[in-house]
Image (spheres, coloured by chain):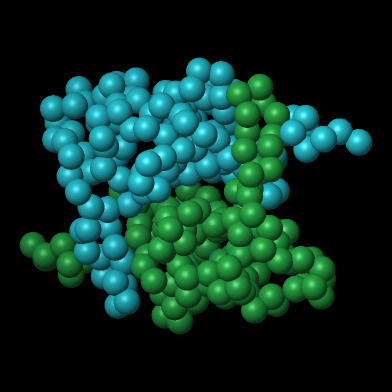
Chain colours: A green, B cyan
Amino acid sequence: MKKTEEKEIELDFSKMNGLVPAVCQEYKTGEILMVAFMNKEAFEKTLKEGKACYYSRSRNKLWLKGEESGNFQQVKEILVDCDNDCVLLKVKQVGGAACHTGYKSCFFKKILKNGKIKIVGKKVFDPEKVYKKKE
Amino acid sequence: MKKTEEKEIELDFSKMNGLVPAVCQEYKTGEILMVAFMNKEAFEKTLKEGKACYYSRSRNKLWLKGEESGNFQQVKEILVDCDNDCVLLKVKQVGGAACHTGYKSCFFKKILKNGKIKIVGKKVFDPEKVYKKKE
């Protein structure tokens, strides 16, 4: 039997029509920056090049995070879950913000017990100055 | 116009046939414990009862995390992302482990640069002693 370290990863893209969810976490603080999706090509590109590349479901194409804004995500570590159908990226977020709205994290809204929302995030940039068009 | 705090959350379940991904994070350490999915009913039950409830894609039914193992997840905070199609739960993990394999986190495998995997997680319990049948 091969040693654990020698097993090659085979992600299971079958459960979501060729995609797996990818959670992106700031490597130093542990803050969750965003959740996106990857197809096989995006995953392989990310692993090879060390910059987070996702698959945009709305645009139906590879999405190198930061290609427009310059706010790339330098991948420090990639983990995969027990059943190989989800990945976790630990990254350094260039520019300090991951969300296209200008907030540091996409998760800037807290859901209160009564179902109402409260903005709790930190706005880092003005999206109108960063994007020519909305990402 | 209503104040931000008064807006009620409306999750967008349309992109994944009635589901949204739910990232589960340990509230004290920031460690990602698991990623699962919620339908509307699971989300509302979680919000109301304060214990993480997901929707099992393999069993096609609501899945109250811990219902078999006793390892419930006490929800401390729920956040939602910019486009309302993903939630983040910050929880206290009863029993200290979220993964059905006995590891603390489902993300116990690191993907190395060459695509091979290395076990980096911490095993907390023996699944054969915790589950009568595999979760």
Q: Nearer the viewer, residue A15 or A93?
A: A93
Using residue A106 as the reference point, say whether residue B42 is left or right of it: left
Position of residue A42 relative to residue A83, above or below, is below
Residue B93 percent location from the top left of the image: 33, 33
Q: Residue reaching furthest top? A: B49
Residue B29 percent location from the top left of the image: 35, 46
Q: Quadrant of residue A91?
A: bottom left
Q: Is residue A57 visible?
A: no
Using residue A55 as the reference point, say whether residue B133 is left or right of it: left
Instruction: Tell me the residue at 63%/50% (across/down).
Output: A121
Q: Is the C terminus of chain B in the top left, top right, bottom left or bottom right quadrant?
A: top left
Q: Residue reaching furthest bottom? A: A49
Position of residue B117 relative to residue A111, above or below, is below
Q: Quadrant of residue B17?
A: top right
Q: Is residue B104 visible?
A: yes
Residue A73 percent location from the top left of the image: 52, 72
Using residue A1 as the reference point, say whether residue B11 is left or right of it: right
Instruction: Tell me the residue at 20%/22% (across/down).
Output: B132
Q: Quadrant of residue B16?
A: top right
Q: Residue reaching furthest left? A: A1
Using residue A16 as the reference point, say whether residue B105 is left or right of it: left
Instruction: Tell me the residue at 56%/74% (across/down).
Output: A94
Number of disc labels: 0
Instruction: Tell me the residue at 16%/36% (across/down).
Output: B125
Position of residue B25 relative to residue B5, above or below, is below
Position of residue A3 relative to residue A118, above or below, is below
Residue B60 percent location from the top left of the image: 48, 28
Q: Is the N terminus of chain B in the top left, top right, bottom left or bottom right quadrant?
A: top right
